[in-house]
Amino acid sequence: MFAAPLRLFRPAVERNPCFHIETLRVDQSEILDGTELKSANFDPDPIELGDNKTLHSYLDPLYREKSPVSRSPTPMSTQYNQIGTKHKSLEDSPIGEVDYETTSRALGDVKGLKILDLACGIGRWSKYLVQHGAREVYGIDISDAMIKGAKDMQAGLPADQSAKLRFSTADCSLPLQLEDKGSYDLVLGAWYLSYAPDHATMVQMFTNILTSLRPGGRFLGVVPNAFCSMFEGYDIYGLRMEASEEVAPGHWKCRLQYRAGDLEFQTTSRLHGWYDKAASEAGMSEITWKPYILPKGDDREEKGFWDAFKLRPHFTLLECYRPA
């Protein structure tokens, strides 16, 4: 079932000092599910409450008050070298299942494509792409430990698939030094853009995407949803994500914890309009947002297992193109 990245409703907010997400009164007739959306090209930013306030800005101080986070930022390469292949536990989690179902469906047919996988991690999507017929996949990540995990994965693949893969370590937020710029049919950035610390860096990251793609080539990115600090109900999935500080208007530093895999890392959540702006400034076009897709084949949705995720999904997908 398709559903919008954010549930589209206009809640009545009770001004209660013990406010919790459950105190939102929702008119069920105002909720739109994916079947009512003619396309996924809608504005998924938080709902305006008047006086230039959003639901996020109303709730955010309350959650920060309840769960203060005072930590020094960890450099991306350092934190992911520490995580290494432990990241697979998050990929295999229930939340990882939704990520997989959504991203694989959004990728579509990749047969014969030349693909750049930015922030490739331990190679989850690089592996998927060659297994589904990609002609060539190049994975880049800032972490040596992650790239080692990706190469270990590559070594276990059949020879014909392994031959289509290559990996290297580089900081993808800096200008990429590619010998084959402008030749990729598709650039995938699963959780790539969320590590831009500021707008200028994000513009550079989109510039990397633009210059890597052939004219008419496509970018697909997985990014955090805008309601970063509203994930109180995610304990059922073993996941917690909370904002530590608003570093600029519409930009929040966040901490993500996954208990089962003993994982913790820093990321950034921002209002979706900032992604649109950076993509446009870099020269990308046809910018659209895509809804999530829940895994099928069991009764978890019917039993309410995904209710917390459907209320406030923690990620969404961005698609855009290099002009032809």
Image (cartoon, rainbow, N blue to C red):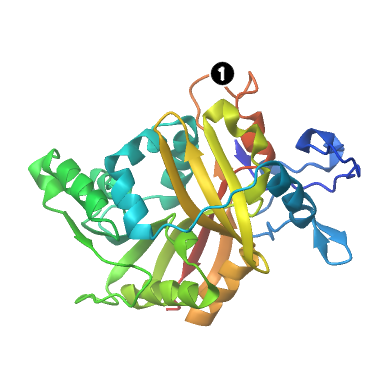
Q: Quadrant of residue 17?
A: top right
Picture mark count: 1
Describe residue 103's horizontal placement relative to residue 227 as left or right: left
Q: Can residue 40 be seen in this view?
A: no
Image-based side of 105 in relation to 36, left or right: left
Q: Position of residue 91 (x, y in %)?
A: 39, 38
10 Å crowding of disc 1: few (<14), some (14-19), many (20+)? few
Q: Residue 136, position in %: x, y?
A: 21, 58
Pick the front one: 287 or 59:
59
Residue occupying image coordinates x 35% and y 78%: 211
Q: Is residue 39 left or right of residue 125?
A: right
| Residue corresponding to mark 1 | 299
Residue drawn at (65%, 47%), measured in percent from left and top?
229
Q: Is residue 243 above or below residue 305?
A: below
**In the figure, residue 270 lies in which quadrant?**
bottom right
Residue 142 sits above or below residue 66 on the image: below
Q: Specify the quadrant that holds the N terminus.
A: top right
The picture places residue 154, in percent across and down from the top left corner, at: 16, 45
The answer to which image quadrant residue 262 occupies is top left
**Which quarter of the rendered picture does the C terminus lie within?**
bottom left
User: Residue 272's spot in the image, x, y percent?
Assistant: 62, 62
Q: Which SS class for mark 1? A: loop
